[in-house]
Image (tube, rainbow, N blue to C red):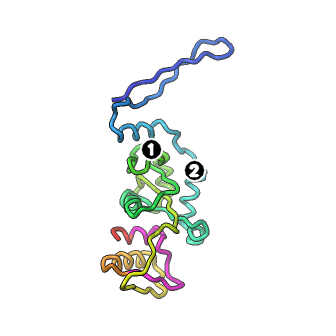
Amino acid sequence: AESAVVSTSATASGRSPRMTSAIAPSRSAPPFQMLYARIRTAAMITSASNPRLKLVRRLSSSRRQRERLGLFACEGEDLVEAALDAGLVPAEALVDAERPALLERLPAAEPVAPSLLADVSALGHPPRVIAVFRREELPRGVRDATLALWRVGDPGNVGTLLRAADAFEAGLALSPGCADPTAPKALRASAGA
């Protein structure tokens, strides 16, 4: 249930009070409704020059930027949820202001105008959520078996081979010249790993 909060404020010049209204969730609302109400009332990102949107654009389009900044972007509910399940903590999270996703897991997510979120996305359809994660937090270690890739230049192939290696509980070793496993195409291809 929602309740309207109405406040009045008189101006210093003595003009008549001004009425302002905001929608706030009642204290008895379920947590998801409270999060959704927070997203609806939070300041929405409406400028294409917003630094967070610029960051996602840079990370999606440039391996050099991903390596230099030590960050990568996941687009879509499935990839973001898989990263969260793996224990990664988002450095940034952006959600579609009209169709927010994963609010219960991303309480600090910032709402973005849907058209802007679609513009920064590499997906064929507008994502409902984009999150930025730190590369250093990706799982690393040695496994009994390892799949070594030599100069596999296509990110989709690297992602597919990563998914296959994980299915066999094998590690993955990349030679110089291999595509970036945190590239958007590689991440989509590795979904499920």
The residue positioned 57% from the left and 46% from the top of the image is: 47
Residue labelled with disc 2: 48
Residue 81 lies left or right of residue 11; in this view the side is left
86 in relation to 148, above or below: above
In three-dimensional space, the C-alpha distance between marks 2 and 1, rounded to whole angstroms, equals 15 Å
Viewer-nearest of labels 2 and 1?
1
**Which amino acid, by three-letter code, is at mark 2?**
Ala
The residue where tag 1 is placed is 97
Residue 157 in percent (x, y) is at 41, 79
What quarter of the picture does the C terminus occupy? bottom left
Q: Which residue range is magenta in the image?
A: 171-188
Residue at 42 percent across and 62 percent down: it is 87
Q: How crowded is mark 2: few (under 14 residues within 10 Å), some or many (20 or more)?
A: some
Residue 138 at x, y = what percent? 46, 69
| Viewport quadrant of the N terminus | top left
Badge 2 marks a residue whose secondary structure is loop
Amino acid, disc 1: Ala
Q: Nearer the viewer, residue 44 or 107?
A: 107
Could you say which is closer to the camera, residue 147 or residue 152? 147
Question: What residue appears at the point 42 percent right and 24 percent down from the top-left corner?
Answer: 4
What kind of element bears circle 1? loop
- Label 1 crowd (10 A; few <14 / some 14-19 / many >=20): many
> Does residue 130 belong to the magenta stretch?
no
**Mark found first going from the N terminus, 2 or 1:** 2
Query: Where residue 83 sits: x, y (%)?
Result: 41, 62
Instruction: Looking at this view, name the residue that lies furthest to the left.
Output: 168
Outermost residue toward the right in this view: 13
- In the rendered view, tell whether residue 75 sits above or below residue 67: above
Residue at the spot 47% in from the left edge and 58% down from the top edge = 89
Above or below, comparing residue 98 to residue 22 in the picture: below
